[in-house]
Image: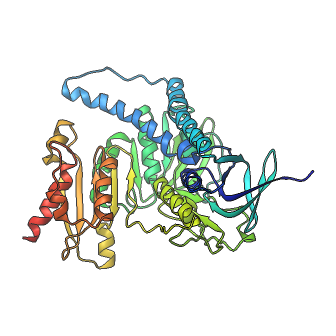
Amino acid sequence: MGDLVVEVDVAVVGGGPGGYSAAFRCAELGLETVVVDGGKRLGGACLFEGCIPSKALLHVAALIEDAERARELGVDFGEPRVSLDPLRKWKSERVVGRLARGLASVAKAKGVDVIGGRAVFESSRELYVEGDEPQKVRFKHAIVATGSAPARLPGLSLAGERVMDSTAALELGEVPERLLVIGGGYIGLELGQVYAALGSQVTVVEMTDELLPGVDRALVQPLARRCEKLFAKIHLGTKVTSLLEKGSAIEARLEPGDAQTFDRVLVAVGRRPASAGLGLEHTRASADARGFVTVNDRCRTADPAIYAVGDVTGEPMLAHRAMRQGKVAAEVIAGRPAAFDNVVVPAVVFTDPEVAWCGLTESDAAREGRTVKIAKREWAASGRALTLGRSDGLTKILADPDTGRVLGVGIVGPGAGELIAEGALAIETAMTVEDLAVTIHTHPTLSETLMEAAESLLQQAR
């Protein structure tokens, strides 16, 4: 007997945020759609090994830190005790599991089938699905949404349960007494703070001279000060040249520096596109030297039948970018006028304090030789920040000196990830600083700092 053959309008390869968003929108537009996913699941790395579980654990870390800060207010809950089994169960069942069941229900309601297996393109119209039940999927259009995977550190070949990537770290197998985090980017700092709150002595090694490389220094400074208190040590401008098992521990050799011993090592040096082995060579679609699939602003590859969305298409590798691209691809396939032409893609680092930004940054402006006006609002002057005991925040706005248009917004402080949406809306809708300044913001709130920063820019113009 031959392989089972399924014929559809749209085949979506990958069930992550970009994939399921595309599939759901295709179904809404009347296109018969299937999702092919290796785990036969919707949610992808974001739901199962990334965004959602990490934020769940960061919430727990924040509760522990809030309890500690409460002592300054005269409230003492005593020393926190963490039981890993109930914590793992809550994360897996009450958070991840509930969201996964919700996505499965939506797929069923919209008539989107999910096929389990690894998809490989055999042509521009056909996929071969490897798995327990091999089958072929013939399609009119396909959307590649295979996402990304944790990057490996070149030259460090040691493998084993004591050397973790972000996926393994989120399983919370144990809380090591001494944890080495290789990488001072957002993944390393987020998970480093989780483990520090749970009781690990965390050492961070970053090869560049700054934490969160490339992010506005004014925004990073409050976070860096917090990390210096939370972590046992931060080594900047440093490389890990070797990892060696020493009994039940790992010896890491640092350059510059000496060898140090840790119970576990977390490698958090970024992510790489999951484009290898897709069979794109059997189509007109192509990937660049880094493995990113090349697309235009319609999310279409060089093959008119094949689209691609999300992490596999390049930076920024963010779930909300993937979701927007997925909807764009679906609408283009359905013949609607759509394009991924958003002005900004906001970014958030969910550490304590949170760091968020969108649009033009000060370093971008300097590199482009662009003149901008800049206003900063320290949260020490915010009534709401003081009532929260968190005056270490900052709100920053960049504007065009001639038109007054808001070009960039940066925020550091608790809730920055929520507040940045107003900045993204301001830039996306071409608001001016006057628009922002005259919009009444509730008092007392942290959002007032955006209004107050805009007011400062207006005063500069007078």
* Identity of the residue drawn at 32% across and 53% down: 421
Question: Which of these two is toward me, 298 or 382?
Answer: 298
Query: With 220 as the anchor, is 238 left or right in this view?
Result: right
* Identity of the residue drawn at 74% across and 66% down: 125
**Which residue, as the protein is rendered here, is positioned at the far front?**
30
Question: Which of these two is toward me, 326 or 37?
Answer: 326
* Identity of the residue drawn at 63% across and 46% down: 111
* Identity of the residue drawn at 39% across and 50% down: 349
Residue 282, percent from left and from top: 75, 70
Q: Is residue 195 visible?
A: no
Up/down of 290 relative to 184, above or below: below
Up/down of 145 relative to 232, above or below: below
Residue 319, percent from left and from top: 49, 53
Question: What is the number of callouts on the image?
Answer: 0
Dividing the picture into quadrants, the one containing residue 295 is bottom right
Question: Which of these two is toward me, 22 or 319?
Answer: 22
Residue 228, percent from left and from top: 33, 45
Question: Which of these two is toward me, 385 or 344?
Answer: 344
Query: With 194 as the anchor, is 426 left or right in this view?
Result: left
Dividing the picture into quadrants, the one containing residue 92 is top right
Up/down of 140 relative to 44, above or below: below
Q: Is residue 333 visible?
A: yes
Query: With 405 as the anchor, is 26 left or right in this view?
Result: right
